[in-house]
Every structure is written in structure tokens, then in C-alpha cells.
Amino acid sequence: MKNGSAVKNNDAGKARMEKDALAKLLGIELLEMEPGYARAVMKVTPELLNGAGVTHGGAIFTLADVVFAAASNAHGPVALALNVNINFLKATTEGAVLTATAREDNLTRKTGLYRMEVKDESGRTVALAEGLVYRMSGDGNS
């Protein structure tokens, strides 16, 4: 069971995630969010295809970025990306349902390192990413 401050911090992070306008625009649904972990899903619609008829890399990146933000912000302090690297491994097309997860690898007072996986509905890996966040102290001395 979570203690009171952990619940309050996670609630603050969830409130920030609910304001993510791009995630809403792309139809990304955040399914799970807890400190150090998040999972979200996105259905590939015609608007998310590139000129070659496959899922736009920017849409896949955004899905990975949303779970990255959720997992890192669930601790409470605002966490902002310093760097994200992504590798696209498999193309998908319209109708695919992509699920992304983020898992925390390392957390310090000022940074957090996360690994993100994006998989299709068959469980095949579509993309792998790694992201580093800067954690704001909240005391004005970040």
C-alpha cells in the first residue's frame, strides 16, 4: 500500500499528464502510472501514417515520450526530458494497436534514466528508447 505522500505525489503527476494536449490529439490512453513505471496504448489511425503509408515515427516517439513522462513525473517533482534516443525496429500500419511501457533504470535526486518499449498487438517490438530526465527540486533552486 502506498503511503500518503506517495499517493499525493502520484496524483500531482497524473494531473500534469491529464493536461497533455498532444497525447489527447493522437488518441494516446494512459493505462497505468506509478513512480518509475507507466503503460499507454495508441491505435494507429490514417492521420498517424507517413507518406510511405506506415506509422509516422513522430507518433511512435510521442507514445514512448508519454509513458516516459508519466513514469518520471509520478514521483511528484516535475521531470523534464534532457535526452531521448529511439530505435525503430518494425514498421506498422493503419489499425495497429501500439502499447508502450516505461521502466525506471536509475533515479537520483536530480535525474532519472528510463527505458521505453513500444510493441504491437502481437507483442512484437516496434521501437526501443531510452530517456534521461532532469528532476526539478521544487524549491526554486533547480
Image (cartoon, rainbow, N blue to C red):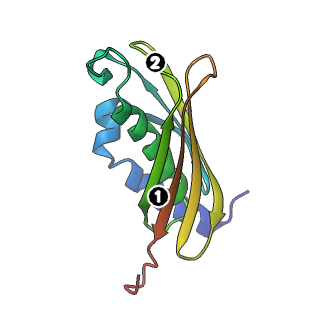
**Regarding mark 2 in the picture, which secondary structure is present there?**
loop
- Hey, what amino acid is under mark 2? Thr
**Percent of width and height locating residue 1:** 73, 56
The reply, left or right, for residue 64 in relation to residue 35 is left
Please tell me how crowded label 2 is: few (under 14), some (14-19), or many (20+) other residues with Cα within 10 Å: some
Picture residue at 48% right of the left edge, 43% below the top? 86
Q: Is residue 45 visible?
A: yes
Residue in the image at 46% along x and 18% along y = 92
Residue shown at the point (41%, 81%) measured from the top left: 142
Asked if residue 8 can be seen in this view, the reply is no
Say above or below: 136 vs 92: below
Q: Earlier in the sequence, mark 2 or mark 1?
A: 1
Which residue is denoted by mark 1 in the rendering? Answer: 13
**Three-letter residue code for mark 1:** Gly
Q: Position of residue 133 (x, y in %)?
A: 48, 63
Q: CA distance from mark 2 to mark 1?
A: 31 Å
78 w.r.t. 47: above or below: below
> What residue did someone put label 2 on?
92
Q: Is residue 49 left or right of residue 86?
A: left
